[in-house]
Amino acid sequence: MRLLIVKLGAIGDIVHTLPALSAIRRAFPRAEIGWVAEKRSVEILRDHPFIDRLFEIDTRRWRSGLKTRQILGEVGKELGGLRRAGYEIAIDFQGLIKSAAIAKASGASEIWGFSRKDLREPASRILLSHTVKVPPQSHVIGKNLMLAGRALGFEDDGRIEFEIATGPEHMAEASEIAARIGSRFAILNPAGGWVTKLWHAEKFGQLADRIYHELGVASIIVTGPAETELAARAIATSKTAKISAAAPSLKGFVELAKRASVYVGGDTGPTHLAVAAGAPVVGIFGPTEWWRNGSLDPLDICVERTDIGCRVDCHRRQCSEWICMDIDVDAAMRAVSHRLADRVVPV
């Protein structure tokens, strides 16, 4: 069987699809599996042992308002070898017009995706040959596993496995960062893709002080290259010297998260990578839902506002009220204390 997975990005979207990839490989150890991903997110998939061929695409360069026929032309320009690969089945885990068009451009005779109500862009349904309806209020990982199972005819065995290929260079990167702060440390991530997902950077600095004074654990503020201002604000608020900043590579972050005593962050790529790495996680969620995007580990904790009525189906990237992330440091600290107390340490 030759199978194409289409999941373009962002990082969290790709991480949430990794268990489906693992399930497919368990069910079909001899399958030839390809994956199409955005260039900005593809690094997390590079050298993956379950992917036979990785296709990189940059849809951000495409003009807005392109029609399906034009999108197919852009796919042909960027992924000239896609059709020649001879994929028989394509699964669109993204649910967008452009992702369905990429699946269509592969030439696969079967193109699977979610049912119209579960598609992020319902118009993409016209490009799919088969669809799968998923139960309401399903975690995105479960949705992806269900789509893969129905498309390929296998039963989900309940295992949730995240496979990310890291190397000695990523371990060395994590070791260098950890050496600056000590063997026990918390990772705090004040960044997020939407402004409405951000917990105040200054509160992360206050939380770092509480974690050190009450638990004796120093903190690393981790951000991406374009998010250093958030780290600076968090560190400027801190009154202790037990805090530092780092901007590791994606796979360096995975190795760092494996060593962390606890991770605290919002609904963003590094949070999902921390879950995949097995770090004890405290999520701070606002306009999105923990039951959909959060950790499936029952020990992990979500801090969220449950006393407001405007969070149902919110998903706003801008908001004039923005009260859902008005969460005090005490609530976050209680969650960190509980998560550390419940931490399972491998023998």
Image (cartoon, rainbow, N blue to C red):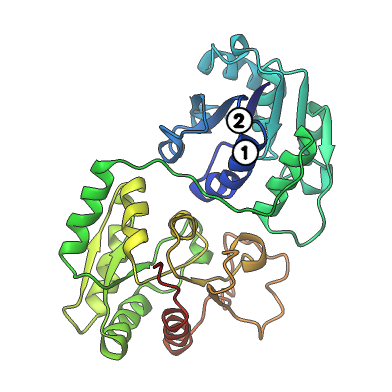
Q: Position of residue 287 (x, y in %)?
A: 61, 67
Q: Amino acid at mark 2?
A: Pro
In the depicted structure, whether residue 23 falls above or below residue 284: above
**What's the residue at 58%, 14% (across, down)?**
76
CA separation, marks 2 and 1? 6 Å
Q: Which residue matches tag 1?
A: 26
- Foreground residue among 337 and 72: 337
Look at the image and tell me whether residue 18 can be seen: yes
Q: From what the image shows, is residue 341 above or below residue 135?
A: below
At 45% from the left edge and 35% from the top edge, which residue is drawn? 48
Residue in front for this viewpoint, 295 or 136: 295
Amino acid at circle 1 = Arg
Figure quadrant of residue 150: top right
Q: Is residue 67 visible?
A: no
Residue ID for mark 2: 29
Q: Position of residue 180 (x, y in %)?
A: 15, 65
User: For the residue carrying disc 2, how many other residues have a C-alpha within 10 Å: few (<14), some (14-19), or many (20+)?
Assistant: few
Quadrant position of the N terminus in the picture: top right
In the structure shown, which secondary structural element does the residue marked by tag 2 occupy?
Answer: loop
Left or right of residue 263: residue 304: right
Residue at image point 43% right, 81% down: 336
Q: How many marks?
A: 2
Residue farthest front in this picture: 347
Q: For the residue labelled by badge 1, is the local secondary structure a helix, a strand or a loop? A: helix
Mark 2 touches mark 1? (CB < 8 Å): yes
Q: Quadrant of the C terminus?
A: bottom left
Residue 204 tag number: none
